[in-house]
Image (cartoon, rainbow, N blue to C red):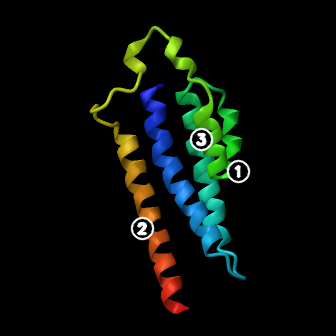
Amino acid sequence: MLKKYNNLSLCFGIPGLILQIAGFILNTPEGYIVLKVVGTALLLIGLAYYAKAKGQHPAWCLAAFLSIVGLIILACLGDKTLSQADDKQLVEPGKPKTVLVRVVSKLAMLLVVVAVLVIIFKIAVH
């Protein structure tokens, strides 16, 4: 698995999945459509990077429309990068992340915190 794309997939995919699920949990007449759309968009980006990390075509990101089921499908796909000779690109635990990954990770965590606060507020109001 290519570490660069795997890190990016986590930065986009996890917040996307959380926002998508929060949008469906808070399903009201207003719809919380923003949470659903932003969550699906982030999950699309995250699954595209995850597919690239596994050496698959990025079009597998369309599995994001199946939410967690799509993630499971993508996780079951084979890893084509295992046959590559360049071991430097493979995931190595403990390696420092790039600046882009750190920034995206912090923004993603901010989105998750906002989603959790919206859920708490929604529960407290009702």
Picture disc at residue 47 = 3
Residue drawn where x is 47% and y is 34% of the image: 6
Depth check: give the residue in front, 108 or 78. Answer: 78
Name which residue type carries label 2.
Val
- Name the residue beneath numbered marker 2: 113
| Horizontal side of residue 108 vs 50, given as left or right | left
| Residue 88 falls in image quadrant | top left
Residue 9 pos. (x, y %): 50, 41
Residue 63 pos. (x, y %): 69, 43
Residue drawn where x is 60% and y is 24% of the image: 78
| Precedes in sequence: disc 3 or disc 1 | 3
Question: How far apart, in angstroms, are the residues tagged by discs 3 and 2?
Answer: 21 Å
| Figure disc tally | 3
Picture disc at residue 66 = 1
Residue drawn where x is 60% and y is 67% of the image: 35
Instruction: Please say if the residues under marks 3 and 1 sit with CB atoms less than 8 Å apart.
Output: no
Name which residue type carries label 3.
Leu
Residue 3 pos. (x, y %): 42, 29
**How many residues crowd around disc 1 within 10 Å: few (fewer than 14), some, or many (20 or more)?**
few
